[in-house]
Structures are given as C-alpha cells and as structure tokens.
Image: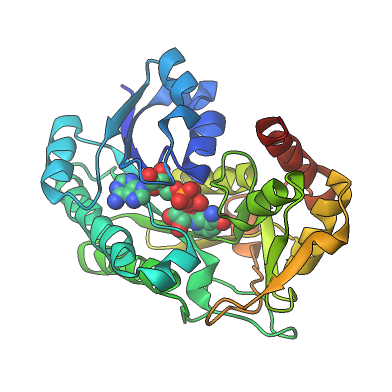
Amino acid sequence: MKKVLMMTGSAGFIGSNFVKTICCREDVKAQYDFVFVDALTYAGRKENIQKELDTHSHLTFIHADIRDSQKMHELFKKYNFDGVLNFAAESHVDRSIESPNIFVETNVLGTLNLLKESLAIFEKKPSFKYLQVSTDEVYGTLGMEDAPFTEQTPIAPNSPYSASKASADLLCRSYFETFKLPVVITRCSNNYGPLQVEEKFIPLMIKRALANEPLPVYGTGLNIRDWIFVDDHNEGVWAAFTQGHAGEVYNFGGNSERQNLDVAKLLLKHLGKPESLIQFVTDRKGHDFRYAIDYSKAQKELKWSPKVRFEEDGLLRTIEYYRNLWAK
Ligand SMILES: NC(=O)c1ccc[n+]([C@@H]2O[C@H](COP(=O)([O-])OP(=O)(O)OC[C@H]3O[C@@H](n4cnc5c(N)ncnc54)[C@H](O)[C@@H]3O)[C@@H](O)[C@H]2O)c1
C-alpha cells in the first residue's frame, strides 16, 4: 500500500522545486501520495506547482496554516500520515529583524503543532517518520580561518530567523529524546535556483541588473556564503528522510564558498552589465560573516554529495531562468 506524506511549504522556493524533482519521480510516485500544506504567504505561490497538481493524481494541495493547531489536528486525523516533511517557514533574515513575532509563530509554534500531531500518530504507527528542514544559520558565523560547520558544532544563532529555526530544531530533538519520535533534521547552506522570491540575493541581483538598476550589496560585500543548487539540497532531504537515522542531523553544502561581491560581479559578467551597477549599502544588523559546511557525514552515511557546479552550471541555469521570466 502507498504511504501518505504531509509536505509543508510546498509552494515556496525549495518546496516547489522538491515537488518537481522528487515528488513527481516515478519511483517516488509509485510508493507515496503527498498532501501539500501551504499557507500561501507572500513567499508561497501555488502557480509554482499548478502544472504538477493538474497532471499527477498522487498530489493533493491544501491551503492551510501550520500555526492553526485545530486544522493540523483535522488533517492528521483525516489522512493518518506516514510521515511529515516540514519545509514551511518564514525564511527571510531581514524580515525577521523587522518583524520577529511571525518567525516564532510559524517556525517554532507551527513546528510544535506538527510534532504533537506526529507523536499521536507515531504511538499507533511505529514506522512514522518526521523530517525537519533546517539551516546552517543555526550554527552562527565563522571567521576566515575557522573549520566549516559539522553536525557537532554547537548551535549559536545570531538573527531572529536563525534563532527561530534553532528553537524548532531543539523541539525536534526533544521529541526524539523524550518520546523517541523518529525525527531527522537537515541543515543546509544558501540555496539558489529557479522559483525563488525576488527579495533573496541572487534573484534580486539578476532582476536589478536586467533593469539596469543599482545592485544593493551589504557592507563591504566581503561576507561569504556557501551556495548549493536547490536540486542538490532536495536530493539530500529525500536521502535523509528515506535513509537517515532517527535523532540525527545531516549537513548539506554546495562546496561553493563565495564572497557576496564576487557573486554580484559574476552575475553582471554573465548578463553583460557593468560592475558600476554595484552599490554598497548599510550592512545588515548582526550580519553573519561566513558560512561553510562540512557535509562528510551525509557523504558517508547517505552517499550524498552536491552534483551541480556553481559557476559552470547552476548559476548559468539560474540566470537563464530569471532572464526568461523578466527580460521582456
Ligand atoms: N532558502 C535557503 O537558502 C534555505 C537554506 C537552508 C534552509 N532553508 C529552509 O528551507 C525551508 C524552505 O525555504 P524556502 O527558501 O523555500 O522558503 P520560502 O520562504 O521560499 O517558502 C516558504 C514556504 O512556506 C510557506 N509558509 C510560510 N508560513 C507558513 C505557515 N504558517 N503555514 C504553512 N505554510 C507556510 C510559504 O507560503 C512558502 O510557500 C525553510 O524551512 C528554510 O528555513 C532555506
């Protein structure tokens, strides 16, 4: 019999790519039905996955909010899920600095709602599994000479966003330690690719460059991010869900540490625009300096490694996607 999974945040950037590349794969489709739950905030666009919803009968979309405990209770009761993949979150650091409450409500309390309902099912169905999509930002920041984050790096979040994600991770951990709920947590570096909301760094830079408008780069532009193509991340999430060990954390990274300024320059080069479009703006408050990921555990235990190369492949595909979208 097919299993039924709840997947939250399915209309967002990473979630909608997951729908396309993982949920619609023949081997996955043969084994699982998916119930997508998304509140369709400013970051969620149902049209991202409408084609898949129209063409695949194993996919169901429900417009619902993970903060709504009553609704979550109804859904868990109705579908008696075999597992949960929780992608839903408020995800933008700048917004968390301006308006932190919603980050705690969705990322922490929403996650708690899912954990509580998951536990009720797990008590009757021991094969139940829960996967929490988290971020490397829970580890805090690194200096130039520091070793990359491992799963053993103590969490030390610096922004309200990363604090809310770390809090959710701790709740997940507590449900494993206290109740033995089979929870797996994934922590990933910065994703890039199609279908991202244009307030995020790479689509924002492309949109501005295409319109010949200034590209706002925080501070000196020397902050470093590790970039991972969204499909590589999603392969990792699926590997962690299907093969990961309960109670474990798995890091995923893209092997592509770059200064923000260098990424902006690369985008301008590929778009044939001058570097004079770069405009340095007041730095983000508490801006983490560097993120870098050691993903050797995922490599060893899940046989996972990133496949898409940043300059040679992923960035070009991403530019092409947004150019087609906006250069009209
Ligand atoms: N984007 C990255 O670089 C990155 C890196 C590491 C981890 N993550 C994590 O991956 C996950 C997905 O990130 P993303 O970039 O796709 O985010 P996103 O902001 O693009 O999408 C979030 C999705 O969650 C939905 N959502 C928000 N609040 C909700 C609620 N209360 N109930 C139900 N749905 C709700 C939104 O409508 C949207 O569809 C998040 O958990 C994020 O923390 C993101």
**In the rendered view, does 85 fall on the left or right side of 326?**
left
User: Residue at left 18%, top 36%?
Assistant: 75
In this rendering, the count of numbered labels is 0
Looking at the image, can residue 59 be seen?
yes
Q: Position of residue 222 (x, y in %)?
A: 75, 76
Location of residue 72 with respect to 278 vertically, above or below:
above
Quarter where residue 161 is shown: bottom left
Q: Is residue 127 above or below residue 105?
A: above
- In front here: 73 or 81? 73
Quarter containing the N terminus: top left
- Residue at 28 percent across and 37 percent down: it is 82
Q: Quadrant of residue 46?
A: top left
Quadrant location, the C terminus: top right
> Is residue 2 found left or right of 302 in the rendered image?
left
Q: Does the image show residue 244?
A: no
Q: Is residue 39 above or below residue 30?
A: below
> In this orientation, which residue lies closer to the viewer: 246 or 202?
202
Q: Residue at x 70, y 54 (%)?
A: 205
287 on left or right of 100: right
Vertically, is 135 above or below 163?
Answer: above
Looking at the picture, tell me which residue is in the foreground, 142 or 305: 142
In the image, what residue occupies the spot 57% across and 76% down?
284
Q: Position of residue 289 (x, y in %)?
A: 65, 79
